[in-house]
Amino acid sequence: MDILTHIAAGIAIGTTITICTKGSALKKIGIVLAGALGGALPDTDAVSMWSKFDVTFGKLFGLQHTGCEIYSAKFWYSHHGFMHSLLASVVFGFILLLIAYLLQQRFRKQKSSFCQSFKRNIYIFLSFISGFIAHLLCDMLTPAATWGGVNLFYPLNTYTGGWGKIWWWNNYDVFLIINTLITTNILILFISQLTKAKLKIFSITVFVLAFAFIVIQVNTRKFDFNHTCSSAQVYQKYEAKSKEIQENILGKKLYNSIKQFDNSVSLNF
Ligand SMILES: [Zn+2]
């Protein structure tokens, strides 16, 4: 799935967690940013497609394969490899906690142990991990391609997903649901700050509803995006089909507006 939807999903999770927790505005911003970071981080393994990868990383690590070959292969550092695993979510979650601990040791007057810092930042950790795992789940819905899913249970060599329920991008309906959830959460936060009302249950209900809507949407495409032949022609055909599905779901007017927005940003979503 595309990076914008992944980041939006991380923000949606982060904002839900902030409503359910107490803390300063700074801490709440930290929780939302951690969710966004968790949503984006797995796709850093697509660095092998960078035009200068072979002359930089390739040379530095003495890699025998080109970046392009690495991307589609099933090495631990290939796309959908270790970076798309549950283990990676925990490892990077702890690295984030360690950075937070070191920053606090450097700038806070009152020193604390790593355990105390961990307890203080537990929601940042949870938001990061949840954003990261949401990314893995979304990617499992995309076509199998050369990987057959994501290496969810690394170091095991099994790949999970590749269900072909959605195309790589053009999932405007899912993007809209996630952004509606973010907007609702911001409104809830605003109202709860103004009225001091406890809207935790309401927020969790909205989150569950959004999740259910996404599950329904991805399961009612009535099209299998998995393809055995990966020629440019086949790719274009599936790409066109994904757009046709979106136009049918959203209606011509909404579809054209969001397509216009999609064309105006340099990232596909
Ligand atoms: Zn990914």
Image: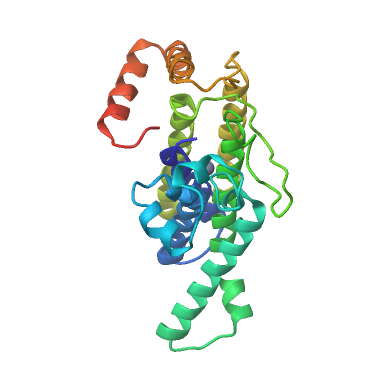
Residue 262 higher or lower than 183, as above or below: above
Work out whether residue 193 or residue 238 is closer to the camera in this orientation and state it. Answer: 238
In the image: residue 49, left or right of residue 164 = left
Specify the quadrant that holds the C terminus: top left
> Can residue 29 be seen at all in this image of the molecule?
no
Applied colour scheme: rainbow
In the image: residue 224, left or right of residue 24 = right
Residue for point 61% across, 63% down: 91
Work out whether residue 72 or residue 40 is closer to the camera in this orientation and state it. Answer: 72
Residue for point 60% across, 22% down: 226
Work out whether residue 101 or residue 147 is closer to the camera in this orientation and state it. Answer: 147
> Can residue 216 be seen at all in this image of the molecule?
yes
Numbered circles on residues, count: 0
Furthest-left residue in this view? 264
Residue 86 higher or lower than 124, as above or below: above
- Expressed as whole percent of the image width and height from the top left, the position of residue 19 reads 52, 52
- Expressed as whole percent of the image width and height from the top left, the position of residue 242 reads 47, 18
Work out whether residue 62 or residue 204 is closer to the camera in this orientation and state it. Answer: 62
Residue 119 higher or lower than 88, as above or below: below
Furthest-front residue in this view? 64
Residue 157 higher or lower than 205, as above or below: below
Residue for point 65% across, 45% down: 151
Residue for point 42% across, 44% down: 49
- Expressed as whole percent of the image width and height from the top left, the position of residue 100 reads 49, 73
In the image: residue 147, left or right of residue 57 = right
